[in-house]
Image (tube, rainbow, N blue to C red):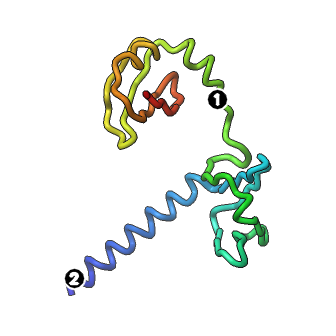
Amino acid sequence: MKKTQLLLTLVAACATTTLADEYKYPYLIVTASDGTETTLNAAVLEITFADGKLVATSGDGTTQLTLADLASMHFSETEGAKPEVDAVSTLSTATEVKVYTTSGIYVGTFESMAKAKASLKKGLYVVSINNTNLKLNIR
């Protein structure tokens, strides 16, 4: 009896968490290799694959996208494209650069990107500058 109650509690907790996360990012943005974007309502989205196509069915209807033409997909809080980041101006005005490994381990904080690059070993890192995250590849 206790095992059944525990199992039901775990299932209910998982369902509640899933529903909360579902509404955090209600859109799936699919970008084709030519740069065109398709926005899909993720709240009731079902994705299947058939005949080399991604078939997305939601409350808005069915959309078919050729798999060979897809470049990327991401979930978004807003309908439409990700905001563009001007990496050059972000790097040049940075007063604090936080560096993390790709596993999310904090490496350190540096006064500038130049100082971070000079201090890091070869590898791929994630840098956080002015609330913007960028990849950094040290060769």
Secondary structure state at the residue bearing disc 2: helix
- Furthest toward the front, the residue is 139
Question: Residue at image x 69%, y 69%?
Answer: 54
In the image, 59 versus 81, the foreground residue is 81
- Furthest toward the left, the residue is 2
In the image, 98 versus 116, the foreground residue is 116
Question: Hey, which quadrant is residue 28 in on the image?
Answer: bottom right
Question: Residue at image x 55%, y 18%?
Answer: 91
Label 1: few (<14), some or many (≥20) within 10 Å? few
| Residue 114: image location, x then y, percent | 45, 13
In the image, 12 versus 26, the foreground residue is 26
Q: Is residue 56 visible?
A: no
In the image, 135 versus 106, the foreground residue is 135
Question: Residue at image x 47%, y 31%?
Answer: 137
Q: Nearer the viewer, mark 1 or mark 2?
A: 1
Q: Which residue is mark 2?
A: 3
Identify residue type, mark 1: Val
**Looking at the image, residue 23 lies above or below residue 87:** below
- Furthest toward the bottom, the residue is 1
The label shown at residue 85 is: 1
Secondary structure state at the residue bearing disc 1: loop
| Residue 132: image location, x then y, percent | 53, 29
Q: Quadrant of the N terminus?
A: bottom left
The label shown at residue 120 is: none
**Looking at the image, residue 109 lies above or below residue 82:** above
Drawn side of residue 97 relative to residue 90, left or right:
left
Drawn side of residue 48 relative to residue 120, left or right:
right
**Looking at the image, residue 106 lies above or below residue 67:** above
- For the residues labelled 1 and 2, the Cα–Cα distance comes to 50 Å
